[in-house]
Amino acid sequence: MVSIPFGLKGLVQESSVFQELIERSIAPLKMSWASIEVVNFVSSAAFFHLGYNVIANLAPHVLSTLLAETCKILEDPHHFYDPWDHTNVQKFLHILTIFSLNFKCFCAFMTNSQELYNEEHNYPLNLSELFNDSINPDSNYHYLGLLSLDIVIWNLNICLYLLELLNFQNILLGFLNFNTEIINEEINIKYIDNYTLIRRKIISKTYFIENKDKEETSKLKEYDTSKLYPLKLNKQIYSLETKYNTELESLLQENKPGLLDSSWVKQIREAYTASLNPIKNIVLIQLVDQMQKAIPTAEWTENFQWKENILSSTDCWFVEEIHGIDLVLYYAEQNNILKNTIEMKEKLQKFINACYAFIQYERPIKFDGFDWFLSTVFIICEGNVDKCKTFIIQLIQFPVIPFLWSNLGKVIDKNIKEECTTQYTFMQILESIISNELPHIKFALKNTSGMDWSLICNLMVSQCFWGILPWSQIMHFFAICILFSPDYIIYYCVSLLYHCQFTIMENVTNGKLWPEHIVLDDYRCHNYIKFMDSLNKRYGNKILPKFSVKGFN
């Protein structure tokens, strides 16, 4: 039952049963986390307030056995030289990866208790202690802490959370600078150890949001040390703004007045399908402007009114969100779209504040994640706040928007008094279609890695595929959500799995786990539009009614 998204959501209504199931699944001090399905259940359960609270109460204790088993391998003389491929170590890192699919789950397990200190144990008893070892070079578990840090910060919210909690960026930079001084003195040194490599890899992820690529070998290699220092911005060799006009651009520039009919929409879709090149920012803005004249307006639109004169004040912001602003502008600069300036930071802060006032979003009492959707809109509009405002006011009329913008989904869920409804509707529909269309891949993922594709897609969509897809494909993802009916966001996610199916089967054969080895940088959505169309013909009539929000007031 709990393996089905709606089954888990329904179980939450039986609070005592739900709580007992979590507690029995992760019995304190006894749980070795042998069942990967339990890990998947726990990660999903933390989406709900009750699940989060139960896990947070147990968190200081329930990972101690798993950590003990892992640390024993590091101390075993038979594995002393290279313990990192041992089954226990890999199992622990995979469990961490599944926890990282849900920011709330990760935060729950970071709950610490000062009462746990025991002189009999010199190994970390919980995640909080382990991640502190990642910034302590004198710890015997420093490298395990670094591996753990590297594997979880693909979730950008976790990255921001740990940046503030551990200050790991500055501390690891300090280690690198210290090593640089030593390297400069020892001219004949040709090798950089694994500690230096992984520290640099982690720091790079806090500056550059790059697509997940193939795992680096852990063996020592010969390096040109001059290439390791300092970190440099990796400018793309091409410009995202193409210099030619496409048929799609020509049609949009006509800017027909009044409501637009279905024949115009069909023509625009055909033109888009034929336009294989990167889509310009201005074209995407025009696309929203024109398409909102051709679609039925979502029923919640009249509840929102834009408020003027909203300030860029960050008085009510969490420090993690300030780190998020920095990361957004690093990313925009990395893609040659915006300059990372104080003025741009203030504009982004003002835009986010104005949007939250617009949808009447109430900030949580503690950091619950950064708004990657609004950040993406800000980059698309190239930092022009007026364009951002118009873009959001128009985009909010599209029925797909609560599934794109998680904070709007939370506002709607709160209004209809149903926790996680928007999120779990998306996950349930996605899992149902995958069960029908790609049952062998679904089974392979579940049987070997213990996870569901919907859980991965929930994370990827919530951070707008940053770090997963190249920027040009993120733009196309937005274009598909704008151009086609709202159910295409589901078909898009199915097409991602369809694209990966042969890689997954190859990885399963070679014993490689997912999502650790997920690579989507070669995905091109235009190759799968016909596939999405075929899914729409089979499922559209059943799915579309589920995208309408009932009872919104």
Image (spheres, grey):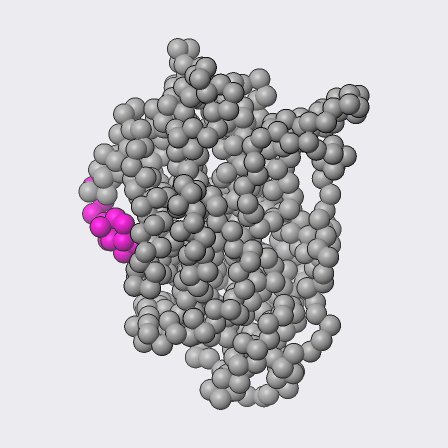
For the image shown, how many numbered marks are present on the structure?
A: 0
The quadrant the C terminus occupies is bottom left
Instruction: Give the percent coordinates (x, y) of residue 198.
Output: 60, 33
Coordinates of residue 95 in the picture (x, y in percent): 39, 37
State whether residue 504 is above or below residue 377.
above
Q: Is residue 362 left or right of residue 49?
A: right
- Residue drawn where x is 36% and y is 77% of the image: 537
**Main structural element of the magenta stretch: helix, strand or loop?**
helix
Kindly indicate the quadrant of the structure image that contains residue 448: top left
Residue numbers of the magenta segment: 1-16
Q: Is residue 18 visible?
A: yes
Q: Position of residue 253 (x, y in %)?
A: 65, 82
> In the figure, residue 92 lies in which quadrant?
top left
Task: Residue 367: tell me if it is visible.
Answer: no
Foreground residue among 204 and 393: 204
Asked whether 157 or 360 is in front, the reply is: 157
Measured as percent of width and height from the top left, residue 528 is found at 47, 69
Asked whether residue 81 is drawn in magenta, I would say no
Where is 269 relative to 6, above or below? below
Q: Is residue 14 magenta?
A: yes
Q: What residue is at 41 percent from the left and 14 percent from the top?
A: 121
Is residue 417 positioned above or below 30 on the image? below
User: Based on the displayed image, in which of its 4 quarters is residue 97 positioned?
Assistant: top left
Q: Residue at x 42, y 43 (%)?
A: 510
Q: Nearer the viewer, residue 219 or 552?
A: 219
- Which residue is depicted at the point 39% across and 10% down? 120
Most distant residue in the top direction: 120
